Image (cartoon, grey):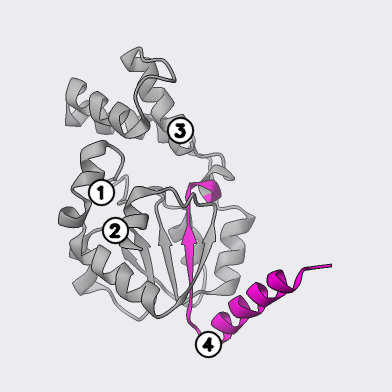
Amino acid sequence: MESAIDQQTLNHIIEAMNDDSLIIFVGAGVSANSGLPSWNQLISELRVELSLDDNEEDNLKVAQFYYDTWGQQKYFQKISNVFSEHTTAVPNEIHEQILKIQPRHVITTNYDTLLEEELNKGVTKYSIIKSDYDIPYAQGNRYLIKMHGDLDSKNIILKENDYLDYENNFSMISTLIKSLIMNNTILFIGYSLGDTTFNSIF
């Protein structure tokens, strides 16, 4: 039997769904369920090439070290290669449930396109926002905001400088997210609340 707190939380989510004020925040755990690499797995691939042990440097510094050592082109090529090993990945049951819920907006830190693939199956269309430049051209009133950028656009947030420069490089997305979370209910799925960029926004 569910506790009173659990039921109260569930009621609040249902109420937000009915009021069309629910935002679903999707983290890497959802993509990992489709077989895509987690953040730690991606960084581990960089560690191997840099000959670093698991306990040497934190993830942000490892990504920055790789970028500084090998340059931008090899950095993006390496990340693309890691993801290309999982080209058979398809949306999973969690993506399907998100489509059924049809939240007002979806915010994600994921670089992949599984959310777009699933949401585009529905009648309700979401404008895909993966950089500040997309915001003025967004159509409709429902957004899929890729707050950590997009792999194909090569504007992903992964290395230390990306986090430090986030407010400058994604200032409009940051402002948009701030306005949305003030007036809506947020449901987190597959996401660690330790993420630096979201905590600074929140």
The residue under label 2 is 130
Q: CA distance from mark 2 to mark 1?
A: 8 Å
Q: Are marks 2 and 1 in contact (CB under 8 Å)?
A: yes
Identify which amino acid the numbered label 2 is placed on.
Lys
Q: Mark 1 belongs to which amino acid?
A: Ser
Viewer-side residue, 12 vs 190: 12
Task: Give the residue number, with chain letter if any, for mark 3.
Answer: 40
Q: Which residues are magenta?
A: 1-30
Q: Earlier in the sequence, mark 4 or mark 1?
A: 4
Q: Earlier in the sequence, mark 2 or mark 1?
A: 2
Residue 43 place in picture, x, y as percent: 39, 29
Residue at which label 4 appears: 19
> From the viewer's perspective, is 200 left or right of 95?
left
Check disc 3 and give the amino acid type: Asn
Q: How many marks?
A: 4
Q: Is residue 154 visible?
A: no
Q: Secondary structure at mark 1?
A: loop
